[in-house]
Image (spheres, rainbow, N blue to C red):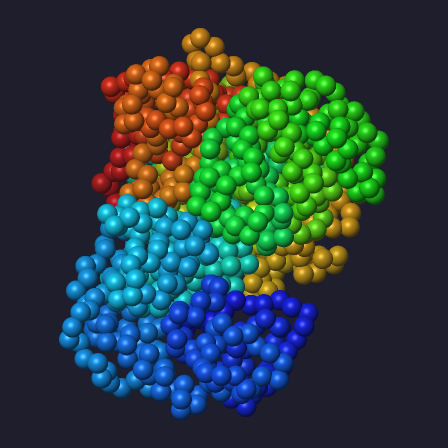
Amino acid sequence: MGYEPQADFGTPEVHSDTIVTLSIDGREISVPAGTTVMRAAALSGGSIPKLCASDNLKQFGSCRLCLVEIDGMRGTPASCTTPAAQGMVVHTQSQKVQKLRRGVMELYISDHPLDCLTCSANNDCELQDQAANVGLRDVRFGYDGDNHLGAATDISNPYFDFDPSKCIVCSRCVRACEEVQGTFALTIDGRGFGSKVSAGLASDDFMSSECVSCGACVSACPTATLNEKAVKTIGKPERSVITTCAYCGVGCTFRAEMRGEEVVRMVPWKDGKANRGHSCVKGRFAWGYAKHQDRMTKPMIREQIDQPWREVSWDEAIAHAASEFTRIGAKYGNNALGGIVSSRCTNEEGFLVQKLVRAGFGTNNVDTCARVCHSPTGYGLKNTFGTSAGTQDFDSVEHSDVMLVIGANPTDGHPVFASRMKKRLRQGAKLIVIDPRRIDLVRSPHVAADYHLPLRPGTNVAVLTAIAHVIVTEGLADEAFVRERCDWDEYRDWADFVSDHRNSPEFLAPVTGVDAELLRGAARLFATGGNSAIYYGLGVTEHSQGSSTVMAIANLAMATGNIGRRGVGVNPLRGQNNVQGACDMGSFPHELSGYRHVSDPDARAMFEAAWGVPIDPEPGLRIPNMLDAATDGKFKGLYIQGEDIVQSDPDTRHVVAGLKAMECVIVQDIFLNETADYAHIFLPGSTFLEKSGTFTNAERRIQPVRKVMEPLNGYEDWEVTQLLARAMGLDWNYTHAREIMDEIARLTPTFAGVSFARLDEAGSLQWPVNAEFPDGAPIMHADAFVRGKGRFIVTEYIPTDERTGPRFPLLLTTGRILSQYNVGAQTRRTENAQWHAEDLLEIHPSDAENRGVRTGDWVRLASRSGETTLRATVTDRVSPGVVYTTFHHPTTQANVITTDNSDWATNCPEYKVTAVQITPSNGPSQWQEEYEAHSDLSRRISAEAAE
């Protein structure tokens, strides 16, 4: 598409059953009651000048540019704050209002630089446009006297500048920060002529303030006051493409605005159903990694992992990869091979990788990074509800009365959705947070949790069982719902179990560390507060009882009737952009696409007929099993697309040992990541900007990913997989990702109605999309559970094997931070590194004092698995006895600390509970030194050029 600003109707859309009809400049228009005159005019094809109004902000009425005349009404009311009424007659272009508007505009321009020809917003400036719209031709007031033209520009933010000399004090940036983002970092300081936008205290600039760089203020600004540095450097965009963000599981829709093959800016798309026109610092600004100097664009091979890489042609790399995997299969058998599907790649790419493994390698040894994050979600929800996904769309939160957030930190991990949560909380919804750490939602501007249950890490099941105990024993369960929608006998067994005194809050308090009365209050609020929704993250799944916790959450939702309508539900917040999609596509070793077990003869028959090869009815190896088999000498070849298991997976020593034991490791990625240090073949990948396909977000929303530039490596990722498949003898002839989606739709019942054409028409679709739900299903289990009757499952608390003791008296839990993403391969190669240049260890003041540790000190972090060093930060965000760190930086080697303990059902690693000790340190650990030395050795590239 060309470059045209998205339509702005001035004020938000109103929903009402009452319709009113009015006349605007002789045109009749019917709108819902409560719609403003400004919006009605825009809907009728007209346009009323405005500067302070925007349709994603509440009506404000400060700029006085949108004045109109209305028959029978005195004066000239502001159209942005005047609601349309039945029979109203509006005049927007009378001589009187035209004269008033020109006078108002004169005042603005008299204190504004007249540098339009050299301004970065030239021809992309609302002030410039509105000056033309009102017919301003000269300024009578002159430019003498006091003005703001000499105000200094704030260039502290790495992504945008703030030039106060061009500010018209419309307050749109301040309101966007409050209403859309919910950070309240900006304010209007002073009064009258002295009014100015301020980022916090007088001593603050944007970088030092509480600004989170979400870009809402930049999008809202009608002038060049807040403008991206890239616009100043590259120039105004000339074309744009609508696509989907490749960071977290929210799945924001963006308009990639381009100049040639360069991205000028990524602007959140207001019609995006996941983000509704909002963004975070990663999606909005952190796309520069696509052309970073570290980007690899040529294939490379080597015989041994301590040898330099040798750049080769695509033909040689693919032929060598196919030859090696064919050799390994012939020598050791098909089960000596496997593949790992990326949750950062598209559905189509993931589908082809698992197809290559099953149809080309002849094995079910395929897995995905969901193994180490949300595999317990798939297991737990499928067993209780019948499907392996969340129940709601994101819009559902607008109808929630109570939110229970457990094991999630939305403001850092899913910031755009967190802004929607905070907006609902400011409207009066209640909040329960269950987390060992005081996350931002517990207390932030104009938001405070009603209950924060700071549980001891590893006791999720005990806390949820205690909550269920209160609900059942106090008669707060919705037994009518349970009788109608669930298996009553199973409910009675579960209710008897949770009612036992050993599951009471008082009995379990010594185990959980949660005050019994606090827990009882939270349980009563959840059961009686109205529409109660549960949102959870990796703090639920990454435990030895991860699957049990997911089922305990499902039990709570069913017991209170909080399933099947808006405002309620069980909502897993997925970590990566396509974790849901990777699971949907059959990337687990026991399931084909659509979560059909490989032992199902009907499912296998469908794929065998389509692919012309037999499918093994036995499940293959999971990632940990592949590594175990490798160290045992039984697993020899691994194809890894877009995952960095050396940095992301637990017990790094074991991961490295497994990779070293293999004869051929193929890594396909955009950078030489940590796993590539142990690879024999490197195939350069493509970024989300360079490919077509789809992502599926946390709400089951299938969204188009559209190519905005040509791949620097020459191929989209699915094309690379196809090259390898053809070299191994498979007759694949896809010419576009849409053809892969067509195959997915033919073979996957929940995707039966999905096509690129449908997605272009609808923008996005939430599976299931089939004959029963032709337009998708925003809310699951509305009339009945997918499995029929909802299933209550007894979830007994079983303590983790990871225990504290004299040697390791503290518990380490891990997580993410706003500015970085996953292993940091992308965000570390952007200016986001200015906010988080290294992983830090949070430690409580009492634990720090006992160890002589102060903020900024280097400390040794040791567990039974290994040790590393990093800097400490002393904070009471964590409880005594608990420490916390992130895993975004490979130099930290955080996962050398984590153990091989895992979820009993899915092998999801227990990242969130590791017994550790903290001591002062003055240098890196032996492992860090050895790892860095190997990495330096492994990343050498021979000067020999490819032919």
Q: As drawn, which residue projects farthest toward the front?
A: 74
What residue lies at 23% left-to-right and 54% top-to-bottom? 155
Name the side, left or right, on which 479 lies relative to 11: right
Q: As drawn, which residue projects farthest toward the left?
A: 144
Name the side, left or right, on which 156 lies relative to 496: left
Query: Hey, which quadrant is residue 602 in on the image?
Result: top right
Q: Taking 287 as reference, is 468 above or below it? A: above
Residue 560 in the image: state x and y as whole percent.
73, 39
Locate the N terminus by quadrant: bottom left
Q: How many marks?
A: 0
What residue lies at 33% left-to-right and 83% top-to-bottom? 102
947, 687: nearer the viewer:
687
Residue 822 in the image: state x and y as whole percent.
43, 39
Q: Is residue 474 visible?
A: yes
Q: As drawn, which residue projects farthest toward the top?
A: 806
Name the side, left or right, on which 116 lies relative to 459: left
What residue lies at 44% left-to-right and 8% top-to-bottom? 806
870, 408: nearer the viewer:
408
Q: Taking 323 as reference, is 151 above or below it? A: below
Q: Is residue 235 visible?
A: no
